[in-house]
Image (tube, helix red, strand yellow):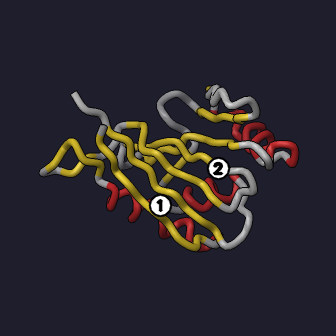
Amino acid sequence: MSSRTSDIDFTFRREVTVRGAVGALADGGWSLKEPLGISYVVNDDDAYDWQSTNLDRAAEVFTLLDAPENLGCHVGVCVYHAEAETGGQLLFFPGRTRCAFSPTINRRSLPDAPAFTDVSWYLQALVKPLLPIGLHSYEACDIGF
């Protein structure tokens, strides 16, 4: 049995905050609230130890992820589109001018080719909300192993 990985890499014209990016995505129907509550990571030790918490702690999570001492670390949150019942990990790179989205929650597949990710759906749902915060470019891939 083969597996797949899908990824959309975004590049911004200027530094963005996690709070700002998630706020922009909220205009497109995305939210931090996903089936596990809120999931987030601060990768300061190369372990990528994802944590979960309640939605009422969202402000604390944003403060942690956007803290100056974490600008040199990869940080991330899961975002979820409740209407579409799908979501994934949004990982921000050090310097915060790049981030990557991986559909890891109820990945949408192509109707006539269910092994493949419906990357075009994710692009349509993610690109437009990110434009106002300086989205410059994206690169998408869907790779089978």
Residue 15 % position (x, y): 74, 64
Tell whether 106 sits left or right of 75. left
Q: Secondary structure at mark 1?
A: helix
Q: Foreground residue, 22 or 139?
A: 139
Residue 108 coordinates in the image, percent (x, y)? 30, 46
Task: Indicate whether 67 appears above or below 38.
Answer: below
* Mark 1 or 2, closer to the camera: 2
Name which residue lies at 38% across and 42% down: 5
Toward the viewer: 130 or 83? 130
Image spot of residue 43 (x, y percent)? 70, 35
Q: Are marks 1 and 2 in contact (CB under 8 Å)?
A: no
Residue 51 in the image: above or below residue 20: above
Q: Residue at x 30, y 37 (%)?
A: 145
Badge 2 local density, few (<14 within 10 Å), some, or many (20+)?
A: many
How many numbered badges does the structure rendering display? 2
* Residue labelled with disc 2: 92
Front residue of 3/135: it is: 3
Residue 25 picture quarter: bottom right
Residue at 25% x, 32% y: name it. 2
The residue that disc 1 covers is 126
**Vertical comparison of 6 with 38: above or below:** below
Q: Quadrant of the N terminus?
A: top left
Q: Amino acid at mark 1?
A: Leu
- Spatial separation of the CA atoms under disc 1 and disc 2: 15 Å
